[in-house]
Amino acid sequence: MAALLESVTISRSSGFRADLSYSTIASSVSSFPISQKVVNLLVFNGLRIQSRSSTRFSASESSRIVRRVGGIVCEAQKTALEVPNVTEKTWQSLVLENDLTVLVEFWAPWCGPCRVIHPVIDELAKQYVGKLKCFKLNTDESPAIATQYGIRSIPTVMIFKKGEKKDAVIGAVPKTTLTASIEKFL
């Protein structure tokens, strides 16, 4: 578990840098004479400290001003909306009985082209929120559904409307191809 200090004041003269590791920061902070209230948090690796510098030249061009800026950057921003999985148990309720148009990606963990198309499906899910529901079906875990719909090659993307299969796109295709197919049924 990581510990978080409620508040810390560090003077500029202390030489505290934004690019230090956690252990260095912890040892630097603990050397300051302050009262500490420690709160335990779970370790999260999605954040990192980013240090940037910008250089400006003064009017005389003989001196320059370097400004260092630090900030916390979230590296997990694009994972906020993940396309949910559908299984044999949830197929009927999530796909066939859905009021919206539904896109289902048939995939498997060992399939390289499937990994290529995953981000495209994620983008489409974000782009068509409220108009289209997107799901992923692992053909290794739900072979009966894959057989029922004649899936012979993955990735295969199928579009359903009112429980009826409307279109199928086979292979790792560009986003524009999938968008054109989706637009026909919205």
Image: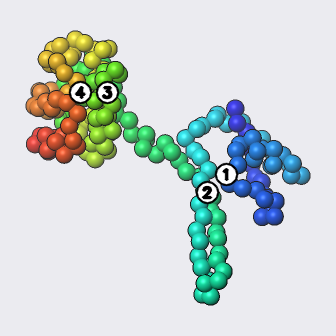
Q: Would residue 183 be found to the left or right of residue 64 on screen?
A: left
Q: Which residue is at 75% across, 52% downward?
A: 7
Tell me, for residue 19, which label it has, or none. Answer: 1
Give me the C-alpha separation between circle 3 and circle 1.
Answer: 36 Å
Q: Tag 1, which secondary structure?
A: loop
**Is residue 89 something that shows in the picture?**
no
Residue marked by disc 4: 155
The residues bearing labels 2 and 3 have C-alpha atoms spaced at a distance of 35 Å
Q: Amino acid at mark 1?
A: Asp
- What whole-number distance in Å separates the C-alpha atoms at marks 1 and 4? 42 Å
Residue 185 picture quarter: top left
Q: Amino acid at mark 3?
A: Gly
Q: Label 4 sits on what residue type?
A: Pro
Q: Which mark is residue 51?
A: 2
- The answer to whether marks 4 and 3 mark residues whose Cβ atoms lie closer than 8 Å is no
Residue at numbered disc 3: 112
Q: Residue 144 lies in what quarter of the image? A: top left
The disc, 1 or 2, on the residue closer to the chain's N-terminal end is 1
Furthest residue in direction right, as rendered:
33
